Amino acid sequence: MFDDYVRNINGRAMADSRAVAQKITTRHGTLVEHFNIVRSVKRILSNDPEAIFNFEECLERRKSGGKPVTYYLMDRDGFMLLVMDLRGKVGAKLRRMYLNAFKAMEAFIQSGGAYRLELAQLDLSMASDHASIHGRGLSMWGREKRRHAQHVKALRDAAQLRLPFGGTP
């Protein structure tokens, strides 16, 4: 699905370093460890001061407690800086796949699709809240829920770009 590669974050098409790491395999077929991606991003940021505009450092708390995990959100240019040195068919396929995903998400955002999806989700949430508040609205919600959910699903499906990639999911 499209959201696996690039997401709309505050009106910007962004890729997650964790998802990138899951899609990159070495020539031996093993996955690249996420810490190697983070190390590469830090190296890029130390060597190119302008790259700070292409990356956003984030922290994820572990469920078991302990030290938070650092990951990066990156825009199209940040992603290209990261994968520029990947070679061979895997690197070319990955670059093409992510560029197509970025272009599609940017077009979706530009066309107002993200706004329409957000409104549909808000409409679904408000109708659900209304049904919860008013017991009488439960029977009405039973009829309305399906229509709202189908509308949200149709907008999500319209925003999805199917990317054929034979790599490891």
Image (tube, rainbow, N blue to C red):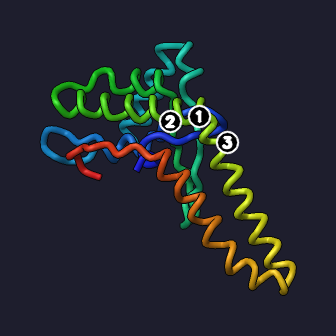
Helix, strand or loop at label 2? It is helix
Assess disc 2: are there few (<14), some (14-19) or many (≥20) residues with their C-alpha within 10 Å of its C-alpha: many
Helix, strand or loop at label 3? It is helix
- Find the distance from the CA under tag 2 to the CA under tag 3: 13 Å
Could you say which quadrant of the image residue 33 lies in?
A: top left
Type of amino acid at the residue the image marks with label 2: Met
Give left or right: position of 52 versus 34: right
Q: Which mark is residue 105?
A: 2
Give left or right: position of 70 versus 143: left
- Which residue sits at x=74%, y=59%? 123
Q: Residue 149: x and y, percent? A: 60, 66
- Which residue sits at x=44%, y=46%? 160
Q: Residue 119: x and y, percent? A: 71, 50
Contact (Cβ within 8 Å) of mark 1 with mark 3 = no
Type of amino acid at the residue the image marks with label 1: Ile
Which residue matches tag 1? 109
- Does 122 appear above or below 107? below
Q: Residue 144: x and y, percent? A: 69, 72
- Which residue sits at x=84%, y=86%? 135
- Find the distance from the CA under tag 2 to the CA under tag 1: 6 Å
Q: Which mark is residue 115?
A: 3
Give left or right: position of 27 versus 86: left
Give 158 or 42, whichever is nearer the viewer.
Answer: 158
Q: Earlier in the sequence, mark 2 or mark 3?
A: 2
- Which residue sits at x=61%, y=72%? 146
Contact (Cβ within 8 Å) of mark 2 with mark 1 = yes
Residue 33 visible somewhere in the drawing: no
- Find the distance from the CA under tag 1 to the CA under tag 3: 8 Å
Q: Which mark is residue 42?
A: none
Give 6 or 37, whichever is nearer the viewer.
Answer: 6
